[in-house]
Image: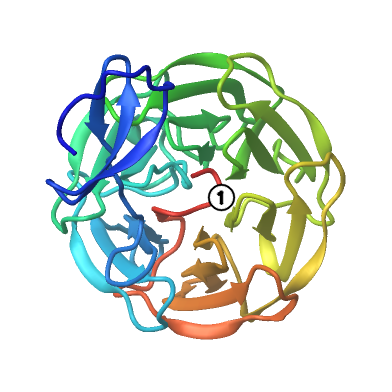
Amino acid sequence: MSLTPKTPIPEGAIRYNTDSNKMEVWIGDKWMIVSTSSPNLDSGTRAAFMGGFQDQPVNNTSFNTIDYVTISTAGNAIDFGDLLSKLFDGASNISSSTRQFSYMGRRGGANPSNSTDTIEFITYSSTGNSQDFGDSTSSLFYQPSGLSNSTRGIRGGGSNNPSTGGVNVIDFITMASEGNAVDFGDLQNQLRYGGGIASPTRGIFLWGNGHPAFINTMEFVTISTTGNSQDFGDLIEPSGSGAAGNSTRGIVGKNDGSVIQSIQLATLGNSIKFGTLSTTRSSLTAASSPTRVIFAGGVISPNTYSNIIDYFSIQTEGQAVDFGDLTVNRHTDNASSNAHGGL
């Protein structure tokens, strides 16, 4: 079985090698071992929550906390490690099957000098502290919109000025190799407080805020190509508060309330109502497996912060179900998973 055949073999042919007990594929002029991997860790999809904040005047505290859950099994979050910096209000939903990224943000307060262009990452399979990846094209916070497929992580919008609207810049990283972000294109609008959802081919930016008014627009890009965004449709309510999904359906949080919306990623159009959270709260984050979306943390009322984790079945509309608790009550942390819809 280990000998190379003398007759021509079609490219991509597969065999089982009884000598090595491995599957092999014919590439070029030789048999190559088929490499396989799974996003499942701890018997399921892993989601991590990185950083976060509690506002003044009570605490005014930012966190470098990283904790994680296994989405298939309800329960409380477990400590993963620490960020290099205490960060919040950056772009969520940027992750591959092996890495999750903390993309930009701020270190505390609304002063523009607290904004950062830092990009850090963790490796899902091994708990521990984050590592430096590179820098974004700008130093921004106010919740830029983030999304990713298996190779690219993309950021759109954000701001570093509390008195003005956002920026229209889109940039991206290649997640497998450390380095700085590069320009992707421009948004149709200058926006902040966004969310992001992706299929393997399409990324959708969900807004949001143009300051001072909230905006319910959605824009999309084709992830494999650079260029400007295009109109996708409208949300029932402005977003800016957590979004995730699988490869066909996106589940979107409302900026201030309990309403959850859904969209179909393959077809342009408006959102529809999906369900409600267990507790009304804003500034929460979301992560997903192919079958579940979880929403975590948030602001319940001024100076009251949540550690609640809710979950929905992506295929079933209705009321959220209790999942467990984060290790720290906080909002605007960075959340994603190793099996979201873009992978």
**Secondary structure state at the residue bearing disc 1:** loop
Q: Residue at x 61, y 37 (%)?
A: 192
- The answer to whether 306 appears left or right of 220 in the picture is left
Give the percent coordinates (x, y) of residue 51.
32, 55
Residue 173: where, in percent of width, then height? Answer: 39, 24
Whether residue 244 appears in this view of the structure is yes
Instruction: Decide which of 165, 169 is in the foreground and name it.
Output: 169
**Quadrant of residue 10 within the rendered picture:** top left
Name the outermost residue toward the front. 7
Using a 10 Å C-alpha cutoff, classify the residue at mark 1 as few (fewer than 14 neighbours), some (14 to 19) or many (20 or more): many
Q: Relative to residue 294, is residue 63 depicted above or below?
A: above
Residue 337 image point, x, y percent: 41, 55
Q: Nearer the viewer, residue 248 or 141?
A: 248
Seen from the viewer's position, the closer of residues 36 and 181 is 36
State the residue position of label 1: 341
Residue occupying image coordinates x 84% and y 56%: 236
Residue 161, horizontal then vertical, whole percent: 52, 31
Vertical position of residue 176 compared to residue 21: above or below: above
Tell me how the rendering is colored: rainbow
Q: Residue at x 27, y 15 (%)?
A: 29
Judged left or right of residue 160, residue 118 is: left
Whether residue 159 appears in this view of the structure is: no
Report the number of numbered marks.
Answer: 1
* Amino acid type, label 1: Gly
Q: Is residue 248 above or below residue 260?
A: above
**Residue at x 38%, y 22% (from the top left corner):** 9
Quadrant where the N terminus lies?
A: top left
Residue 66 location, quadrant? bottom left
